[in-house]
Structure formats: structure tokens, C-alpha cells
Image (cartoon, coloured by chain):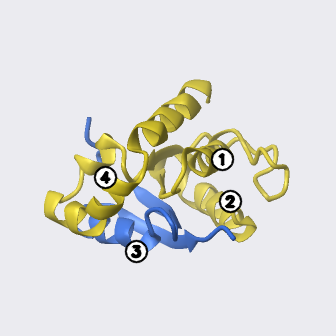
Chain colours: A yellow, B blue
Amino acid sequence: MDLENQRRIKEAAEKYGAENLIVMIGGAEAESAGLAAETVTSGDPTYAGPLTGVALGLTFYHAVEPEFKESVDPDVYDDQIGMMEMVLDVDSLVEEMNSIRGAS
Amino acid sequence: MAIDWTDKKVVIIGDRDGIPGEAVEECLANTPAEVVFSSTECFV
């Protein structure tokens, strides 16, 4: 994850409280999405950014997960995300997100 | 189970080749969620 974004997430967690923050991830592949999810839960696994060793334990979702899809306007979702939903490997993304949740 | 957006702050880490931040932001526009910041990263 971009180092500046790590810094902004850390600031947001401190300002609003981790329990009030949700991170939405749009990564194209399971690996990159998983890295982002891991970064905002147990810390930057690449040891590169401000979240190195910082376990924020934030709640996160990928934009193609059913929890997110079911919580927003279906027409807007279809319009904004519908096409990419057909292109991305949704099963792998969901599996990776659940894997990170299980580990955190 | 759908996400309860009440009193939630959201940060968006989008992906140019996946789901851009703007797309997620549009989806959240009709929810009680407040977007703190939105970003679209790209990997080269």
C-alpha cells in the first residue's frame, strides 16, 4: 500500500477510533488486495511504511464482497462496479479477504 | 450480511486496474457512511 495512504489511515484510526473506521479495498488481484487488508489489520507486511508493526485491527471489505454489494444501492453498484465484477476473480478475492479476517 | 454504515467513517484504497476509489465513493453516496479519504492506486 502506498506509504502516504498508510499514514492517512493511521491518522484516521487515531482521530476517529478504529471501531468507527471501515477500509474499502479495490485491489484487482487477491495478492494485492490481501496485502492491503493485512496492512490495515496486523501491520505492513513489507516493513516499508508507517504501519510497519502497527496492528490497527481495522474492519475492511473488498468492493466485490457480497457484504458491500448488499449494503449499497444495487443500481449504483451495477453502474460503478458491475463491469469490473465480471472481469475480476471474485471468488479468489473473497477467499483472500476471509483468509485475512481469519488470521487477524 | 449487509454492512451497517451508521456512524461509520470510510477510507477507500482503490485500484486503477481493479475498483477505483471513485466507484466505491459513488456507491457510498446514498449511505450514512462518511468518506474520510479516497485513493486510487496503480501498480506499475
Residue extending farthest to the right is A47
Residue extending farthest to the top is A102
The amino acid type of the residue labelled 1 equals Leu
Cα distance between the residues tagged 1 and 2: 7 Å
The amino acid type of the residue labelled 3 equals Glu
Cα distance between the residues tagged 4 and 2: 24 Å
Residue designated by label 2: A1
Residue at the spot x=51%, y=67% of the render? Answer: B17
Of labels 1 and 2, earlier in sequence is 2
Question: Is residue A49 shown above or below B3?
Answer: below
Whether tag 4 and tag 1 are in contact, CB under 8 A, the answer is no
Whether tag 1 and tag 2 are in contact, CB under 8 A, the answer is yes
Task: Chain letter for mark 4, please.
Answer: B
Residue A53, disc = none
Q: Nearer the viewer, residue A51 or B17?
A: B17
Residue designated by label 3: B22
Q: Secondary structure at mark 1?
A: helix
Residue designated by label 1: A35
On the image, the x and y values in percent for residue A4 come to: 71, 70
Cα distance between the residues tagged 4 and 3: 18 Å
Q: Are marks 4 and 3 on the same chain?
A: yes
Whether tag 2 and tag 3 are in contact, CB under 8 A, the answer is no
Question: Is residue A36 shown above or below A91?
Answer: below
The quadrant in which the N terminus of chain A is found is: bottom right
Task: Chain letter for mark 3, please.
Answer: B
On the image, the x and y values in percent for residue A52 come to: 81, 49
